[in-house]
Amino acid sequence: MISLDYLLAALVLVAVQLRICAPLMTRRTRAVLAVLVFVWAMLPWPWGLAGWLLSYLAGFSIATGLLALLAIQHRIVGHYWLPVGQLRAVCIMLVLMALWFYPMSLGSSYVDPYALGFGNFGFATVLLLVGLFAWVCRAYATCVVLVLVQGAFALDLLHTDNLWDYLMDPWLVCWALGWLIRDRILAAGARLPEEEGEPAAPAQDCPLAARAEGQ
Amino acid sequence: MGRIIHLLIGAALVAAYFWATPAHLWQAPPLLKPAPQGRMPASDHWRMTFASDADTTMVHAASMVELPDGRLRAFWFAGSREGASDVAIHSALFDPRNGSWADEHVAVTREQIADQWGRYVRKLGNAVPVLDDNGHMRLFVVAVSFGGWAASRLVVLGSDDLGTSWQFEDALTTSPFMNISTLVKAPPIRYSDGTVGLPVYHEMLGKFGEILRLDPQNHILGKARIGHGRKAIQPLVLVDSPTHAAAFLRNEQRPNNGHLYQSHSVNGGWDWQPLTYSRLTNPSSALGGVVIAPGHWLLATNCNTEERDDLCIRETRDGGASWTPRWFFHNRQAWRDDQMQPRPFLNMIDNELDKTVQVDNPARYLDRVRENKCRRGECTFQYDYPYMLRASNGDLHVLYTWNKAAIRHAWLRADGGGA
């Protein structure tokens, strides 16, 4: 059954393939291989990779799909579109939220945050407030992701009926955690020349816009 | 230009909020729909027969649904052993007019689900049917792509010919972590708006029960949790009134004190009280049950704290404050500590076969029991996984796993007549 879940899985596979191949191939070869992997992934089960991936990992969120798209664009075009400051803030938020969300949803208490995703005014309002905060901070990438996630949910584009599944998934959280660790390592490396006399980055008012430059 | 984009994005956020709010949130939550009140059958004469034909080595986890014409359709999983790749969902029809079961047949295979779903399916497990008001039948089946039962997912198959043929309809996403660890065992409950509540349970990191509220298109509209931690599975929900329901759950605590857990909801099943121990002893095995009238419930289960070597039906008339054993289908506790040799064991099984009507080939059933329950010269009894149904005419039906070799059917007629 070919669906948006299939497309997201195919995009994730292509993004991973490009990440692995990036240092080994020219941009043109990478792109050709990416197309081949995409086509292979999109073949119906049992021939396509996406069907097998989804058999084991279930589905990917819209946010993961958008991230995979950006990663593919970055590896093929060479330009990184997403502001790093926003990405950092979102990664921190994702990891912190996951620390609360997954244990509770998997039964550690009577409270079930996952149930809110099947329809809850409070949850929808919190998402709106997060979006408005990002909007005030002019963190438009976060706003666009939230709008697309909720739009996809309204159109019932994924197999799930839960808004959380459109918003995030465990693999996105793993990626965010990895990205933050890498970020800390790169920041620690950059601090050395700074201590040798280079100027520090200017402070920003809004957390989502902080350290938006660099990397 | 920048200002216009800024305003447009803000407007899009607000629009997305309203757009993504599910329609059912704007409606009042439905109430529970209790089954019509009935009376206890006048007779104590349960008629025993087999729903399965011993076509396969192993059978387990039967369920059933009443068809509009009063017949019953039963489902169970069957194969060479539990979890084997050849396990399929089998089905058979019972006609109360002549009191006989039609031949069992394979209803759904894992290959069929895999082909129609487009995902790898390694094995199948419990199946629970639902008959919608429009005559469409749905079968909720436990399907596993990798690992054991803890990695279970629920798939839905649909049938427009009352269960003769099936088509894959949907896979339910019920957990945020790889959508694994959701199983089904007990009968569904119904809401006033035509939606269905499917009691499910998780048994990976946590062991707890839940109720999924589903619309006829298999969309999950809500979820309510019964219990938490690693305590209890396989919730059986008994609906007493539009607002009150009781749930009984199999105790999975380690160490286990040998009592079923229970919980109550007084707001239509949306919130459940914390789990407490019931007065009902049980060796951590599955249970079935029906509501006769408000506070008058029957529960079919193993009635001791240790083994699945008995099977009884308990009755309460005061909403669970007190229980009495009403009928014992089996009671092999006296032989529990003995090392049962195959010969005396099979003699006793033969005796049970004698009390079962319409058995075509007793020797085959005997062979199946030996294959399943005798190991290295020692045999054990097993009567478990009861599924209970009160038919629209008041008859009581129980299906249960008989020594893993057959699905046995116990039938008590409401009019007191023998069958």
Image: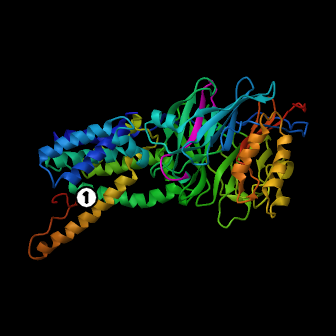
Protein image colouring? rainbow
Residue B388 picture quarter: top right
Magenta region includes residue B7: no
Residue at x 22%, y 43% (from the top left corner)? A34
Near mark 1 (Cα within 10 A), the count class, few <14, some 14-19 or many ≥20, is: some
The residue tagged 1 is: A206
For residue A188, above or below residue B19: below
Can residue B244 be seen here? The reply is no
B170 left or right of B39 in image: left
Region in magenta:
B131-148
A203 left or right of B231 in image: left
The C terminus of chain A, quarter of image: bottom left
B256 left or right of A167 in image: right
**Residue type, numbered disc 1:** Cys
The N terminus of chain A, quarter of image: top left
Tell me residue B148's x, y (percent).
Answer: 53, 53
Tell me residue B109's x, y (percent).
Answer: 55, 36
